[in-house]
Amino acid sequence: MFKCLCTDDTPMVRRAAASKIGEFAKVVEMEHLKGEIIPLFNSLANDEQDSVRLLAVEAGITIAGLLTESDIESLLLPMFRSAASDKSWRVRFMIADKFIDLQTAVGPTITKNHLVFHFSGLLKDVEAEVRASAANKIKEFCTNLPADIQEAVIMPNILPAVKELVCDTNQHVKAALASVIMGLSPIMGKDNTIQHLLPLFLILLKDEHSDVRLNIISNLDSVNKVIGIHQLSQSLLPAIVELAEDPKWRVRLAIIEHMPLLAEQLGVEFFDEKLNSLCMSWLVDGVFAIRSAATSNLKRLVSIFGLEWAQNTVITKVLSMARDPNYLHRMTTLFAINVLAEVCPPDVIAKFMVPVISNLAADAVPNVRFNVAKTMALIVPSLDSHTIEFQIKPCLTKLHEDEDMDVKYFADEALVLCH
């Protein structure tokens, strides 16, 4: 009956048979598996419908797990070779997607002798979807290779394909590669990482697409463990700083958004030495979107490094901007206080921030004064009654009498919250 289903005239029936033949193979004797099931499987694997052939790929992997290496080589390997170069990109995508399962099923010897060539071919496939799927498997494929042959396989076969993928025209292919390429460092070792991989990291770090850059920054830690923070700072940090100072504000914005993740990867000591001043410089950027993102960035950094770091490193610098002659920078101080107050305890807000806010209430620029009222409204729920009564309310009462209508409006709004 199952044989009839595998050879049915209706493609839908053959698809159903292809999806179940692997499970069927698990419950038959080895004699019937080799003599009857595998011929049926090969028929499905060579079906005229690609929807049948792609289902046969997964079934083939299941069957391979039941056979010896010699049987796989003689009975199934031709099918896997055919699938890896199938005229339908969907079949090639399926084998790329299941390649690690295939590698596990056939074992290291067949992988070394036969699969490496086909994996390299999938990395160079004409279809971006296939390349992206194969690229996503690079780290795992290389990790699964026996340790004594990893370098001998990777250097001549995988690395040339990786170098091509770094400059791929498709964003999704590069993003897939960027998510795993850093994981090759522990496999390839320090010298090969410095010589071959670091230049590729730099290219991806400067990619125009933010998801590619993010995937590189997200995995810096694995490279740091192999080559050390000193080498990492010498090679990748200049590229990060260059992007952070890029004339295009959207590029600078992308780096700001990644900075907390970068800080978490590199640690507080390295961050303070190399990147802290950069983060502070964004607070006085000429573009509002950058200044706004920089204030949000501070909040996330405080969450990572803690309150003590904030008091010693950030808060004093932010509050000193309240004396800046540029009113936009004085307003940035208020915006920074708004976000820092969310992660700072009441005593820090009352001791360090409230006096600065109160001083800005007398600013000559109405925009600064009404932002003082808005900031006070935000921090009131965090303050004790004494601070509200003797520092916040007198200040808001004065702003309530301001000649500017916007200042009066926001002062009234904040006063309501004080009662």
Image (cartoon, rainbow, N blue to C red):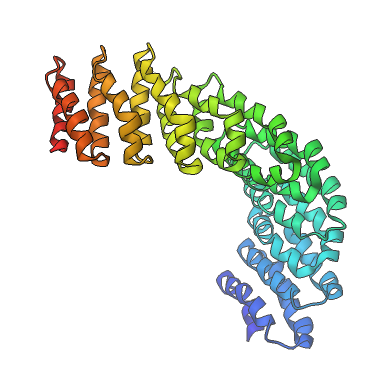
| Residue at point 64%, 63% (across, down) | 54
Find residue 75 and report its horizontal and vertical position in percent: 81, 73
Q: Is residue 130 above or below residue 385?
A: below
Residue 416 image position (x, y, % from top left): 13, 35
> Picture quarter containing residue 399?
top left
Q: Position of residue 378 (x, y in %)?
A: 26, 35
305 with respect to 68 (left or right): left
Apparent side of residue 320 relative to residue 373 in the rendered image (left or right): right
- Residue sitting at x 52%, y 21%: 248
Depicted 132 relative to depicted 395: above or below: below
Q: Residue at x 75, y 69 (%)?
A: 105
Image coordinates for residue 87, horizontal then vertical, percent: 70, 54
Q: Viewer-proximal residue, 12 or 257?
A: 257
Position of the N terminus, as image quadrant, is: bottom right
Question: Is residue 220 or residue 373 the one in the foreground?
Answer: 373
**From where the camera sits, is residue 183 visible?**
yes
Residue sitting nearer the eye, 57 or 336: 336
